[in-house]
Image (cartoon, rainbow, N blue to C red):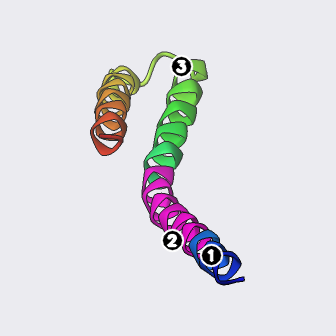
Amino acid sequence: MAFLKHRARLVGLIFAGALFGSGLTGSVMAYQGHMWNALHAEQNALAQLQMAVPDKGGHRVNAINLLNQAITQTHLGITAGAR
């Protein structure tokens, strides 16, 4: 009987540890979620600029170049955050 109580406690501790660990992972994923949302917003903005009429006094092209740099930096941030 004592063996079963010990085993039930052990299972309970393992379960509690798994819940606690998943909570920590969830908070890390939530932070990365903001980075992923930013990346999608940057990609959507880039797609809109690429579909826009080309003649904007060079500002459209400059915005496209800056968005490409932002997308690269966001990817690097996601990679760094995953470590």
The residue carrying mark 2 is 20
The residue carrying mark 1 is 12
Q: Give the residue drawn at x 46%, y 64%.
A: 27
Q: CA distance from mark 2 to mark 1?
A: 12 Å
The residue carrying mark 3 is 50
Residue 69 lies, with reference to residue 28, above or below; the image says above
Foreground residue, 25 or 56? 25
| Comes first in the chain, label 2 or label 3 | 2
Residue type marked 3: Gln
Q: Quick check: marks 2 and 3 in contact, CB under 8 Å? A: no
- The stretch of residues the image draws in magenta is 12-33
Residue 76 lies, with reference to residue 2, above or below; the image says above
In front: mark 2 or mark 3?
2
| Comes first in the chain, label 1 or label 3 | 1
The kind of secondary structure the magenta stretch mainly shows is helix
- Label 3 neighbour load within 10 Å: few <14, some 14-19, many 20+: some
Q: Is residue 1 left or right of residue 60?
A: right
Q: Examine the image and state in which quarter residue 68 appears.
A: top left
In front: mark 1 or mark 3?
1
Foreground residue, 80 or 65? 80
| Comes first in the chain, label 2 or label 1 | 1
Residue 32 falls inside the magenta stretch: yes
